[in-house]
Image: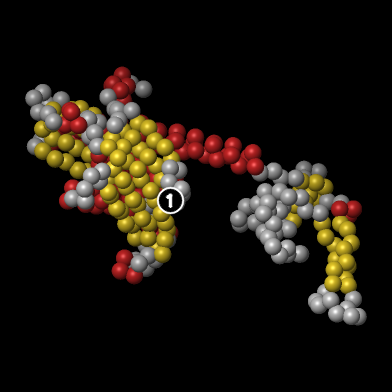
Amino acid sequence: MTKEAIEINCTLRPINCEINLLSKSDGSTMFMQGDTTIIAGVNGPLEARSQKMAYDRVSIEVTYTPLKGPAKVDDRLIETYIKETCESAILVSFHPNTMVCINLQEMQDSGGLLACAINASCLALINSGLSMRFTVAAISCMIEKETGEIIMDPDSSQLKNARAEFTYTFDSINKDIVCCHSIGQFSQNEFLACMDKCRQVSKYVFDYYREVTKKSSRSLESEYSGNATCIQRTFDSDAFKEERISVGRATPGRQSQAVPTIDVYPLCPPDPFSPFWLSRIQRFSMEGEHLWTSIKYRNEPSKRKRE
């Protein structure tokens, strides 16, 4: 890492987040950049309403709620930026005739609100598991009025002396611009200089996404490994036993039939794409012996199915 990159990185405010915050959302996060805090929740794909249905793609609906009072024109602008950014990042053709709802709640605004909202939306989409072309990272910066210095990720006190404000959003593949928002007076060279610095800083936001995702996956693995067990044993004819069950109604003269059943241990639920109740998955060991895995739900259904 170069000295310039270290200096640029040190100028960023601390980034923190908490994922899976909302229990009724498919993906959620509370994202904090400095004191600026946004809570984002993602639900979907859901059944789309007729007036918003697209037959060949997923429709995205963004709702931004400010901290105080009703939504204003600037809040609707935030919704538009987030919607267009997410439409370019999500694989919209994977879920036609559906919609994805992104809800954002402002908790505190201390500068860089748009960048924080975009990053919170992206992390909530990652947490929801939706298929995406790429992830996005938004970086804000400003040009100071007196000195013309470029300040990265300014807070509300620094923005009072700003001549121009910028918010750049980059993709994770080629670091190309997905969207850009600017306010104030600036030259073309200043615009390009701010864009280059924000592109360098975006790398650290993407690294933060990866770190959060790895920690989340590790916590899930440890959680499920404590509850999930799998017993495999060599297939043996002694494992079968004869059981007499009546066929049809228990009427006089009705004969019972002997059927082989196998002892099933109360294990964890299988993969949702595997066979369900009392399924026996044949496996092969390294020695070529036939192995069977007995699988059973913890909560036994009221009516037990028999193979």
Name which quarter of the figure residue 160 lies in: top left
On the image, the x and y values in percent for residue 247 come to 83, 74
Vertical arrangement, residue 50 with respect to residue 167, above or below: below
Q: Residues within 10 Å of mark 1 (few under 14, many from 20)?
A: some
Q: Residue at x 10, y 23 (%)?
A: 147
Residue position marked by numbered label 1 in the rendering? 25
On the image, the x and y values in percent for residue 225 come to 63, 40
Closer-to-camera residue (216/21): 21
Q: Residue at x 83, y 60 (%)?
A: 261
Vertical arrangement, residue 8 with respect to residue 295, above or below: above
Which part of the image, by quadrant, shows the C terminus? Answer: bottom right
On the image, the x and y values in percent for residue 237 come to 88, 54
Closer-to-camera residue (118/204): 118
Name which quarter of the figure residue 43 lies in: bottom left
Task: Say left or right for 60 vs 143.
Answer: right
Residue 101 visible (yes or no)? yes
Q: Secondary structure at mark 1?
A: loop
Vertical arrangement, residue 183 with respect to residue 132, above or below: above
Which part of the image, by quadrant, shows the N terminus? Answer: top left
- Exactly how many numbered labels are in the figure? 1
Residue 170 visible (yes or no)? no
What colour scheme does the image use?
secondary structure
Q: Amino acid at mark 1?
A: Ser
Closer-to-camera residue (3/71): 71
Name which quarter of the figure residue 45 lies in: bottom left
**Residue with the most extreme front position:** 69
On the image, the x and y values in percent for residue 257 come to 88, 71
Q: Residue at x 38, y 48 (%)?
A: 41
